[in-house]
Amino acid sequence: MLLSLLLVSTASVALPADPKEVRKQFVELADKQDRPALVELWKKNPTLVLPTIDRDLEGSLAEIEKGAKPDSDKVKALHKRALFGASCAYEASGHPMIFDYTSSFTGWTAAQQKTFREGQKASGAAGQALQKKDGKTALEKGTECYQKAISLGDWWGAAMGLDAIGNAHGVLGDKEAALTALSQARMINHDLGLWGDEYGNLTAIASLCVQSERHARGRTAAQMGRELAEKLGDAEGAKQMAELEKICAEKLGK
């Protein structure tokens, strides 16, 4: 679903390369079925794995949705390349979620493909509602997005739905429900290698933990958020996370 691998020693993870170059290398390596080289490419560019593979998945669905008779050979080729890339991603990271998402996507029926598009639409509506601070609508659409996505094995969409649900609860003033949903979204985004989305989740989680006096958990969330902010080059965000770390440490007396 178009619109981060924190436990795999982030200190050794390189920052993303040019997405176009990574995509070019992916296509070349997949065509040659060069598994060792593609595993290394994914290890060096964990944040680009899912977006790169998803271009083939979305491309296959766009071909199917043309209206005229789709090119079945093209669809099969895109699916084959995506599955190979996802298999290598599993080997590179040890996380199965991208492989499961890709496998699910390539096996959807026409009805399930329609459900996928409906989930995307609901996600967009939830985002628009959040911009207007309309928590009720955002919660309704976020829940719709999550339910449709999770039924399909669409983990990316599920994370987006949970993110909307969490932020909607935040607008509505329910900190407990917000923390629950955002924590679930964070874990999915983590396994999908979506650092930016995971970072957004962590900043909210750390803040909610401080507000609800969960200082031990808050310190850990803030620490992970700070480390991720540094990887993403967000100096101001890293500073804010460090301040939350300090607040939690002082509350804990450590």
Image: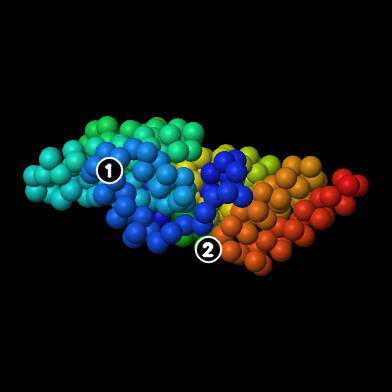
* Nearer the observer, 10 or 205: 10
Whether residue 252 is visible to the viewer of this picture, yes or no, is yes
SS class of the residue under badge 1? helix
- At x 53%, y 44%, the residue is 5
- At x 12%, y 40%, the residue is 73
What's the distance in space between the residues labelled 2 and 1, CA to CA?
44 Å
Dividing the picture into quarters, in which one does residue 30 lie?
A: top left
Q: Is residue 105 above or below residue 53?
A: above
Dot 2: few (<14), some (14–19), or many (≥20) neighbours within 10 Å? few
Residue 26: percent from the left, percent from the top?
A: 32, 49
Q: Which mark is residue 69?
A: none
Q: Type of residue at label 1? A: Ala
Q: Earlier in the sequence, mark 2 or mark 1?
A: 1
> Residue tagged by mark 1?
30
> Residue tagged by mark 2?
132
SS class of the residue under badge 2? loop
Q: Type of residue at label 2? A: Lys
